[in-house]
Amino acid sequence: MLKIETFTCNMLQENCYVVSDETKECVIIDCGAYTEAEKLAIKKYINENELRPVHLIATHGHLDHNFGDAFITSTYGLPLELDASDEAYVRAADKQAALFGIALTEPIATDIKPFTAGAHLKFGSHDIEVIETPGHSMGSVVLYIKDERVAFTGDTLFRGSIGRTDFEGGSMLMIIQSLRMFVQFPDDITLLPGHGPKTTMGYELAHNPYLDR
């Protein structure tokens, strides 16, 4: 049984998820915590629930999903795990920050462990399948926990919409191709995006103009 806690972070209202199960192991997905208050809220939740973080995972390398990486690494000793195609974005975070008028005083990630297509990340009694979905960025992925019928979609798919493709490495053609993967999911699967409210596959098939079977 999963417990999923959502933290809305930074100036772009990004969703960071702390996902745990009965073993008390947890994963931190898309740690966009920017302010000290946001970072401390995540730490407080982990401490109060006696959780043990075992993975720090990013669905892609954009800045708003990774502001808090160095904090998590320094606090829990975890490297940032993300698709190898987006590693360069994280390492060049200062260039991303300049686009938003943000000055970074230190790297957002101090330890990076890239993964590739088909990776499986385990925590507690659960398995996370990494599914490549390029388009929003070259290294965008969906994190799928099949036995719980839950997928973390990053900025590939939102409720009723899809992610932007006008950033460096983005491609409308590629994101449309990636979206074809979603129709393989059952209608009752819960989709947890990088921004905005959660949704289901059934809702998206009925209301999202970019999806059909």
Image (cartoon, helix red, strand yellow):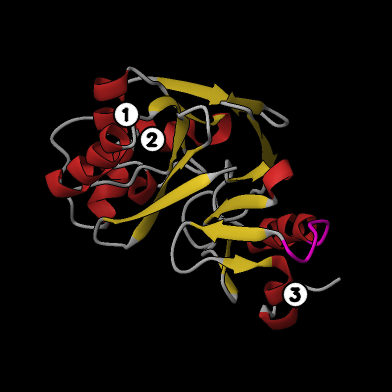
Q: CA distance from mark 2 to mark 1?
A: 7 Å
Between 46 and 56, the one nearer to me in the picture: 46
Instruction: Using residue 209 as the reference point, say whether residue 99 is left or right of it.
Output: left
User: How many residues crowd around disc 1 within 10 Å: few (fewer than 14), some, or many (20 or more)?
Assistant: many
Mark 2: amino acid: Val
- What residue range appears in magenta? 183-188
Q: Secondary structure at mark 2?
A: helix
For residue 184: magenta?
yes
Mark 3: amino acid: Leu
Q: Could you tell me if residue 210 is visible in this image? A: no
For residue 121: magenta?
no
Say which mark, if any, is on residue 179.
Answer: none
Sequence-earlier tag: 2 or 1: 2
Vertical relation: 23 (above or below) 90: above
Mark 1: amino acid: Ala
Residue lying at the far right of the rendered structure = 213
Locate the N terminus by quadrant: top right
Percent position of residue 83, x then y: 56, 33
